[in-house]
Amino acid sequence: DSVIGSESKKASHEFTPSQPRGVLHRAFSVFLFDSSTNELLLQKRASTKITFPNVWTNTCCSHPLHGMEPSEVDGPEDVKDGSVIGVKNAAVRKLEHELGIPVGELKVEGFKFLTRLHYWAADTITHGKKSPW
């Protein structure tokens, strides 16, 4: 699992006959629980999202970005040992952007890496049920 380049969000999610599953890329999902009730915070995605608009989903999801400080890019060893500090930094950034949770309120050390998945999701919500994928 080595980074070999970068791509825009739009380009990496384009499904075309020549690229029927988009571009393989890193992403993350955050599941934020209320520790006093064990309730999971879900959100309905904005209607203006490029992918899966108006869909109820996890607390937050996005992609680690190149060139950010602190770094959001993990190396193969980070993924292998589950430390993934880069993607945890990305999660903190995105939780502020999506939900207004100030950077520093949720400590990177408090995030638990569960697993990694290799999958693709065809967004028929955006592109219609008659999409070739």
Image (cartoon, helix red, strand yellow):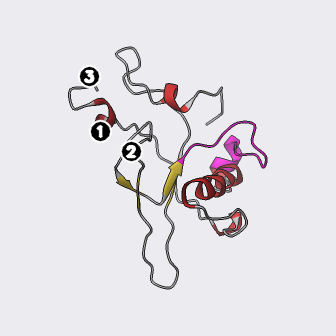
Taking the magenta stretch, the answer to whether it contains residue 65 is: yes
Percent across and percent down for residue 8 are: 57, 28
For this orientation, the residue located farthest to the top is 18
Q: Is residue 52 above or below residue 133?
A: below
Dividing the image into 4 quarters, which one contains the C terminus? top left
The amino acid on which the numbered mark 1 sits, given as a three-letter code, is Ile
Identify the residue position indicated by label 1 in the image: 125
The amino acid on which the numbered mark 2 sits, given as a three-letter code, is Ser
Q: For the residue labelled by badge 1, is the local secondary structure a helix, a strand or a loop?
A: helix
Disc 3 to disc 1: CB gap under 8 Å: no
Query: Which badge, 1 or 2, is on the more N-terminal residue?
Result: 2
Percent across and percent down for residue 103 are: 71, 62
Identify the residue position indicated by label 2 in the image: 47
Identify the residue position indicated by label 3 in the image: 132
Q: CA distance from mark 3 to mark 1?
A: 13 Å
Q: Residue at x 50, y 77 (%)?
A: 34
Query: In front: 85, or 93?
Result: 93
Q: Residue at x 60, y 61 (%)?
A: 100
Quarter of the rendering containing residue 37 = bottom left
Query: In front: 46, or 76?
Result: 46
Q: Residue at x 59, y 58 (%)?
A: 95
